[in-house]
Image (cartoon, helix red, strand yellow):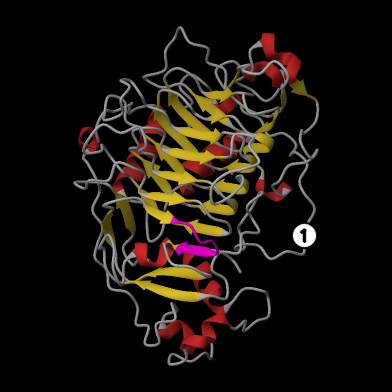
Amino acid sequence: MNFHRLSAAALLSVALSPSLSASAQQLAFPTAEGFGRFAKGGRGGDVYIVSNLNDSGPGSLRACAEATGPRTCVFAVSGEIRTQSRIRVRSGFLTIAGQTAPGGVVLTNRGTPNVNSPLDIQADHVIVRHIRIRPGPSPTVSDNVDAILIDGEDIIVDHSSFSWGTDETFNIVGNGGSSAGGPVANSRNITIQWSMIYESLRNSTHSASNHSRSTYLGYGAQDISFHHNLIAHSQRRNPNLGTVGQLDWVNNVVYNAQQYFGELYNRHGTSNVNWVGSVAIVGPDTLKQRDRNAVNIFLNDGVATHNLYVNDNLDMNRTASSQDQRLIVDPKDWTYISASPVGTGQLSLSAAAITSPQQAYKDVLAFAGATKPARDAADNRVATEVRNCGGGIIDDPSQRGGWPTFANAAAPADADRDGMADSWETARGLSASNAADRNGDLDGDGYTNLEEYLNELAGDNA
């Protein structure tokens, strides 16, 4: 484990932070954590079989994502979906089950007229798992190309991979403090977990040059859990936090930020941020003359302030767990640091989910991103670059070999098109000719039979 002049031997385990008590609510899936863990997704609803890679029409991902009512998108196809325009999720209670794609699936804007994000979620109760989104340069100048845009409540994104945006690559926005708004009033109760966000393009098709921006969680969004994720190879917004309510930043790894690592702003109200068990690692593009603190605090509002809790993090200024916890923040901003978790007073993750930063480093590099059926070449490359302190910020995907291809593997037989493989149903005494049994609950644990199948494909222990 090479932390680029940060010795792994110096890292020590410390006690875990407080966690929320157990709740009777049903988890989105067994390994769901954080504020978004109770997202319902398409539970009990319809199944849409994604049977082709077309942008639209019957059998497309868009047909499922843009439908209404509780629904689950199950993939019987693998490969690249080139979005001609953004896929707009405006009706909630949706599950996008990327783990069902036999050889993996990716959304891109490659060679299309799309000047927006491939996936735009403005709805509630959405579950997204094992999806890759890599837009790439737009055909004309555009300031709107993120990989994904999220504006909603009760949302969880798990084991997904995002890269090659030209604005931010990952974007969660609230309503800016307004009581009015669009399809939803605000963004809250959101979890991003076990995902990879990397290589936001620098000199590309954004109107501003040198616009490599990674992750924006803000505009008044609140109650967000961001844990066990990798951010790599971007100039700024690694992340940019402009949230209210509570944000838990736990067990994340940030590598090769050029100008700033974490940026905290209060332009939409007082921020309450818990920064725990995370690692910030300098890389080839990190500027020596810049502040290399893991957390950088900015004041935009004369009334609102910052409340920050830090525990067991590592960066260039804090290289061992025995050192002062505050060293990841510039000393001039230590006045904002609290001695205990802020917001509700406890973290939104279970204690068992939180590890030491050195363990988080190992786990994130081994398991984050879309891993079903397997990590693709781009994700594997970036994980290796972090381990070896290599790679760098890019202008175009062609500098790193372009978009990976996916094997066109055959989907398992599903005679009744209920989203569950016939062999799986037969082994459990279900009927391969009765689509309605997908919404039964054979073992009475609160997950439908379809959810049990999806959870098993994702590697959960239901």
Q: Quadrant of residue 325?
A: top right
Quadrant (top left, top right, bottom left, bottom right) of the C terminus: bottom right
Residue 152 falls inside the magenta stretch:
no
Q: Residue at x 52, y 70 (%)?
A: 69
Determine whether 78 is above or below 357 in the image.
below
> Quick check: 57 left or right of 443?
left
Out of 420 and 142, give the one closest to the viewer.
Answer: 142
> Quick check: 292 left or right of 14?
left
Describe the element under mark 1 as helix, strand or loop: loop
- Dot 1, how many residues are within 10 Å of its Cα: few (below 14), some (14-19), or many (20+)? few
> Quick check: 100 left or right of 23?
left
Q: Quadrant of residue 451?
A: bottom right
Residue at the disc numbered 1: 23
Q: Position of residue 115 (x, y in %)?
A: 29, 41
Q: Residue at x 26, y 52 (%)?
A: 84
Q: Is residue 456 visible?
A: no
Residue 91 falls inside the magenta stretch:
yes
Q: Position of residue 267 (x, y in %)?
A: 62, 24
How many numbered marks, from 0 up?
1
> Quick check: 354 left or right of 149?
right
Out of 391 and 26, give the one closest to the viewer.
Answer: 26
Out of 398 and 90, give the one closest to the viewer.
Answer: 90
Determine whether 11 is above or below 49 in the image.
above
| Span of residues in magenta | 89-96
Residue closest to the far front: 180
Q: Amino acid at mark 1?
A: Ser
Q: Position of residue 23 (x, y in %)?
A: 77, 59
Q: Position of residue 208 (x, y in %)?
A: 33, 22
Q: Is residue 86 visible?
A: yes
